[in-house]
């Protein structure tokens, strides 16, 4: 089932995810729905916060980058209770976007290599797995989500100020997207 994607300004995007275990209700269905939602929105990664669930779960599928980066492993992956152990290598700048912040992409610097420990969908533990380049970037972006952080939080203050109007529009539902978005609840005036 395709789920609505949480729009910028929704409080769930700022929540640090809780760890889950293999008994999390309907976990396999949730993961299946997340992939369907991500593919429908033409994304390469999706975190649970982006479907309004504050848990430590994200998915990636770097296949769209396969042509541009022919040496990458385009295997889709599920990350549960992930913990980045280290970020290493040189800082690389790359234009990032986000399904929760449609229509905005900005250059973000991230380190080129990461070491991460996580559980997969079968709760097999992957300890100190290394990722490099574009896959490391996608993982870092989604890892930020499960820790309540957005890619725009990496931007200088001036750049964020310049985006303020566009971000406000997104939180008000003014975005040109082909997928459903879950908007923040409006505060009522008393």
Image (tube, grey):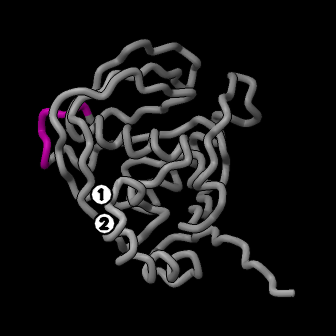
Q: Are marks 1 and 2 in contact (CB under 8 Å)?
A: yes
Q: Quadrant of residue 73?
A: top left
Give the x, y percent position of residue 78: 48, 32
Location of the N terminus (image quadrant): bottom right
Please tell me whether residue 17 is drawn above or below residue 157 in the rendered image: above
Mark 1 surroundings: few (<14), some (14-19) or many (≥20) residues within 10 A: some
Please tell me whether residue 104 is drawn above or below residue 190 in the rendered image: above
Q: Label 1: which residue?
A: 96
The residue positioned 21% from the left and 34% from the top of the image is: 112
Give the x, y percent position of residue 10: 63, 64
The residue range painted magenta reads 68-73
Q: Quadrant of residue 56?
A: top right
Residue 35 in view of the camera = no
Instruction: Determine whether, in the image, residue 169 is placed left or right of residue 65.
Output: right
Please tell me whether residue 161 is drawn above or below residue 59 in the rendered image: below
The residue positioned 57% from the left and 75% from the top of the image is: 171
Mark with earlier residue (1, 2): 1
Name the one closer to the observer, 145 or 24. 145
Q: Label 2: which residue?
A: 105
Name the one closer to the observer, 167 or 135. 167
Residue 10 is one of the magenta-drawn residues: no
The residue positioned 45% from the left and 15% from the top of the image is: 126
Give the x, y percent position of residue 132: 22, 30
Mark 2 surroundings: few (<14), some (14-19) or many (≥20) residues within 10 A: some
Give the x, y percent position of residue 107: 24, 59
Q: Quadrant of residue 162?
A: bottom left
The residue positioned 37% from the left and 39% from the top of the image is: 140
Distance (Cα) linking label 1 and label 2: 5 Å
Residue 55 in view of the camera = yes
């Amino acid at each position: 089932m395709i789920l609505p994607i949480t729009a910028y300004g929704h409080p769930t995007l700022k929540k640090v995810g809780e760890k889950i275990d293999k008994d999390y209700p309907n976990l396999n269905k949730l993961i299946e729905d997340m992939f369907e939602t991500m593919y429908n929105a033409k994304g390469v990664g999706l975190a649970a916060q982006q479907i309004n669930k504050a848990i430590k779960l994200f998915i990636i599928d770097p296949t769209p980058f396969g042509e541009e980066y022919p040496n990458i492993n385009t295997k889709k992956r599920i990350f549960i209770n992930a913990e980045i152990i280290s970020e290493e290598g040189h800082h690389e700048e790359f234009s990032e976007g986000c399904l929760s912040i449609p229509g905005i992409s900005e250059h973000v610097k991230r380190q080129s290599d990461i070491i991460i420990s996580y559980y997969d969908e079968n709760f097999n533990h992957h300890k100190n797995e290394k990722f490099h380049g574009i896959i490391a970037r996608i993982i870092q972006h989604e890892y930020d989500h499960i820790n309540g952080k957005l890619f725009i939080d990496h931007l200088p203050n001036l750049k964020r100020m310049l985006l303020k109007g566009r971000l406000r529009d997104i939180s008000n539902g003014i975005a040109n997207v082909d997928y459903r978005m879950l908007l923040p609840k409006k505060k009522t005036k008393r």
